[in-house]
Image (spheres, coloured by chain):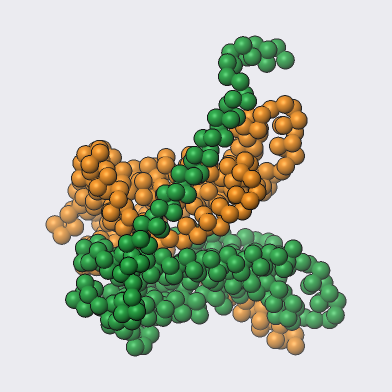
Chain colours: A orange, B green
């Protein structure tokens, strides 16, 4: 009996170490495959090189880093205000019945596959941008709008959790002092929930910078350094996915190196997202 | 007090008015958001539903998918999802049991949780890269149902762990106390008391993971391949619905067929997520 319990406990321990193990394996294999070329080309020429022509031996990924950053910031500018507004409405203002209905609806929408977002982007958004704002339509702007829409459900549901975690006594106290509900929200509830809302935004950024297929379909994928949001660009993720199918040798290594850079970006964002909550937990 | 007095004359807008304007603005934002998201679904269904027919679902594609149906991609999606869940469910639920019932707090639990959080944040293209280099090349599995399924298993592992952990944690402590009091061992308590109560909650995570597997493209396209034949074994390459849709749309092979595939995809995922929601609601009613 005792032996059986020990065996079970050990196997559960092994199971639970699997995610850490897999994470380590992922880092290991992507790094082993990707880092040699970074050091062969030099870290700075690789990160800040303007030219990406892997078949001719030019491996500069600055345009992709710039593309990823533009697209991610654009997505955040769209999803941040809209997402926080929606969560404030759902938690603080909307009647119970409405928010009970909207919550599962938003959850359902979070499940729409990213390729579908990209497709709708090609069909609706790209022609719209081409006709109203000019340029080829396939652009940073299109990718930012599509990504912003995609990460909205994530931003909404996490900031909703943050707002709900604010004790009701805060609101009651603010209202009892004669503040209007809006004043209570902006001066008491939102500041109290800011850690969670910041985490929602950072996690949304993480999703945006890591998204691939939807971006490929609308961003245009040009390898030049973009100078305006209406120009086509290429992101780190789309760089990998576009060329992976036929890359060999140094070219493939360069794509894994792009993955290394992406991996580091994501890990930095994840650490950032968990900082505020950890601090809150310790207080 | 004096500072507040000094500020008062500067504030010209009545706070009540601000409140009303803000409420209207918030409602507008919410309605706009929902309208956009609902519009996406409506557009795809409006154009996609007319394409659907028994033939579309049950026939093989002809001329790269310009004609015929999508049957092999349905089989491929199904097989990949089954492989992924067969691997991820025991590992994920095992992790959740260990974290909640065996080491509730402490350094090890924090270490494991940190790993799970990080894994949850890894983008799917990185899973694709890893699956390609590790399963396809290093383990010589080639582009196959197995490579794709294992890659998806890693991808959904955090989802299953988190939901299972939440569900197990929601089981009242008194249940365990009664079980231990009756002389049961830790494992007996887990299998006979905790898991049966937490099962619907755990199921929610599994069902949500099915949805993620069905909709995934980047992690699958480099690990399972893009073959259009019906996969006969787990070592055959295959193409999922999402990958098929991506190829149809991106290479402009056939817009009607792209819409049709997208409609099947969206309907499948909406049904899956609705099922997950229904299970969760029932679970909450049972536990609380």
Q: Residue at x 49, y 68 (%)?
A: B271
To which quarter of the image does residue B64 belong?
bottom left
Res B219 seen here: no
Asked if residue B188 can be seen in this view, the reply is yes
**At x 39% / y 55%, what residue is drawn?**
B40
Q: Position of residue A160 (x, y in %)?
A: 59, 48
Number of labelled discs?
Answer: 0
The image quadrant of residue A117 is: bottom left
Instruction: Determine whether, in the image, residue A86 is placed left or right of residue B267.
Output: right
- What residue is rendered at 34% in x and 88% in y? B232
Q: Work out whether B221 lies above or below A168.
A: below
* Residue closest to the eye, B45 or B114: B45
The N terminus of chain B - image quarter = top right
The C terminus of chain B, quarter of image:
bottom right
Indicate the position of residue B193 as horizontal and vertical percent values.
Answer: 74, 77
A35 or B21, which lies in front? B21
Q: Position of residue B252 (x, y in %)?
A: 21, 63
């Amino acid at each position: 009996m005792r032996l059986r319990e020990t065996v079970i406990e050990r196997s559960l321990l092994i199971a639970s170490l699997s995610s850490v193990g897999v994470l380590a394996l992922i880092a290991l294999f992507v790094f082993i495959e990707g880092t040699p070329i970074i050091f062969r080309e030099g870290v700075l020429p690789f990160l800040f090189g303007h030219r990406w022509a892997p078949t001719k031996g030019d491996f500069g990924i600055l345009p992709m880093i710039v593309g990823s950053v533009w697209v991610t910031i654009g997505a955040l500018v769209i999803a941040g205000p809209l997402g926080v507004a929606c969560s404030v409405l759902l938690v603080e203002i909307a009647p119970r019945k409405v928010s009970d209905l909207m919550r599962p609806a938003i959850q359902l929408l979070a499940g729409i596959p990213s390729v579908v977002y990209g497709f709708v982007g090609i069909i609706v958004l790209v022609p719209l941008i081409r006709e109203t704002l000019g340029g080829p339509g396939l652009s940073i702007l299109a990718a930012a709008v599509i990504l912003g829409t995609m990460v909205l459900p994530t931003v909404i549901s996490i900031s909703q959790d943050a707002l709900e975690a604010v004790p009701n006594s805060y609101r009651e106290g603010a209202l009892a002092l004669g503040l209007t509900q809006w004043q209570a929200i902006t001066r008491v509830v939102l500041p109290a929930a800011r850690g969670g809302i910041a985490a929602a935004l950072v996690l949304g950024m993480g999703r945006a910078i890591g998204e691939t297929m939807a971006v490929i379909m609308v961003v245009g994928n040009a390898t030049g350094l973009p100078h305006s949001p209406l120009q086509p660009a290429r992101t780190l993720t789309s760089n990998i996915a576009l060329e992976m199918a036929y890359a060999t040798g140094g070219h493939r290594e360069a794509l894994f190196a792009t993955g290394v850079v992406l991996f580091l970006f994501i890990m930095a964002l994840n650490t950032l997202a968990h900082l505020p909550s950890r601090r809150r937990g310790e207080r | 007090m004096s500072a507040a007095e000094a500020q008062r004359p500067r504030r010209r807008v009545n706070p009540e008015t601000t409140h009303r304007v803000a409420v209207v603005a918030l409602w507008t934002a919410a309605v706009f958001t929902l309208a956009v998201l609902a519009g996406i679904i409506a557009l795809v269904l409006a154009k996609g539903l007319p394409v659907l027919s028994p033939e579309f679902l049950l026939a093989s594609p002809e001329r790269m998918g310009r004609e015929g149906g999508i049957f092999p991609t349905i089989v491929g999606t199904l097989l990949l999802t089954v492989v992924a869940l067969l691997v991820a469910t025991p590992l994920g639920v095992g992790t959740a049991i260990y974290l909640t019932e065996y080491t509730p707090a402490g350094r090890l639990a924090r270490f494991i949780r940190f790993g799970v959080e990080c894994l949850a944040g890894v983008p799917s293209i990185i899973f694709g890269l890893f699956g390609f280099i590790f399963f396809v090349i290093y383990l010589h599995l080639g582009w196959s149902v197995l490579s794709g399924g294992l890659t998806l298993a890693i991808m959904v592992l955090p989802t299953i762990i988190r939901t299972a952990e939440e569900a197990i944690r929601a089981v009242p402590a008194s249940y365990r106390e009664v079980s231990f009091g009756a002389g049961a061992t830790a494992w007996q308590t887990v299998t006979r008391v905790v898991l049966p109560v937490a099962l619907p909650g755990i199921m929610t995570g599994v069902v949500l993971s099915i949805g993620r597997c069905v909709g995934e493209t980047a992690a699958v396209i480099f690990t399972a391949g893009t073959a259009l034949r019906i996969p006969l074994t787990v070592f055959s390459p295959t193409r999922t619905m999402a990958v098929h849709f991506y190829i149809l749309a991106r290479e402009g092979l056939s817009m009607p067929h792209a819409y049709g595939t997208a409609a099947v995809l969206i309907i499948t995922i909406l049904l899956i997520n609705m099922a997950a929601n229904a299970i969760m609601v029932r679970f909450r009613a049972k536990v609380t």
